[in-house]
Each structure stands twice: as structure tokens, then as C-alpha cells.
Amino acid sequence: MTSGTGLILTAIIDNRFVYASTEHEIAEVIRTVIDVPHPVWTSQLYLWDRPCRSMLHHRIDDEEFPEHQLRVSTNPETGWGALNYYGDEDVWDSLNPNPSADAPELWFDPTSGARFRRNAALPLADVREAVREFTKTGSRPTRVTWQVAERV
């Protein structure tokens, strides 16, 4: 059974490309992105009319990625995660209107040392709902609050 959108979810998980188009495949990608620890890489999600390709498959006349991305960072052990969305020339981070002092630091990009602000940390249930919404629309999820992204 397909997702009904005719779109393909491309996930880059632990620096590997994974493609999903059925409800079962998409559910497995969501589970892997959120419930499995990823200490070295944050996951990146794209929803498009074709699979995204790595630069290894590059052809001069091909577009490799759409103009939007959802980055997902989670810490399943503590139950927290953070989101970053870019699209339409804007970049957003999730915003917890009631940030918790117990929220851990979450990586934006572990390889560069960039972290999310602590107020970007959301309970995993909220992250899961936002990711589910993204896999249906490819747009910035409306189920969470957002703030303009800031990297230092």
C-alpha cells in the first residue's frame, strides 16, 4: 500500500540513503529516525516526486535534492528530540514553549559540534507527530511551534 501521495520519502540515516514510499516503509523510517540512537549523524528527511541522490550519482542536468529538508535529532534514552526545517528560503528550529531544565543538549550537526538551543528540545511524542506530518506534506509541520534558526 502506498502513501497515497505518489511522493517518495528519502531519509539519510547514519549517512546512508533510505527510500520509502509505502505506509509500512515510512513507519519503519520514522521508527528508526526517532527510536534508534544516532550519535554521529542527525537524520535528514526529504519528500519529493523522486528519490534524492547522493553526489556519487550526480549528473549535470539532474537536481539532487528538493528545496526543503527536515533534520531530526533525538536522544531516545532521555525521551527528547529537536527539529530543524528549511524551505522557502527560511530556516526554523523547533521551539518548546515550556522548555524543561531536564532536556539534554541535542546535536544539530555532531561532526561540526553545532547544537540546538535547549528550548528546541521537544518530547519524542511531539517529534514523532511532526515527522509523521512532514512525511505526508513535505512542508514545515504545524504540530509544533517554531523559532528562527540560530547557529553559533
Image (cartoon, grey):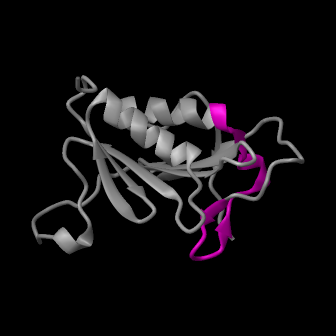
What stretch of residues is rendered in magenta? 107-125
Q: Position of residue 124 (x, y in %)?
A: 66, 38
**Outermost residue to the bottom:** 112
**Relative to residue 124, is residue 14 depicted above or below?**
below
Quadrant for the C terminus in the image = bottom right
Q: Position of residue 52 (x, y in %)?
A: 25, 55
Position of 135 relative to 116 (above/below) = above
Observer-nearest of 120 and 25: 25
Image location (x, y in percent) of residue 84: 56, 51
Residue 123 shown in magenta: yes
Q: Please tell me which residue is depicted at 41% across the width and 38% down the height of the picture.
A: 28
Q: Is 60 positioned to the left or the right of 40 in the image?
A: left
Between 25 and 100, the residue placed more toward the observer is: 25
Place of residue 90 in the rendered image (x, y in percent of width and height, measured from the top left):
50, 51
Can residue 65 be found in the magenta stretch? no
Question: In the displayed structure, does residue 40 sit left or right of residue 76?
Answer: left
Q: Is residue 84 visible?
A: yes
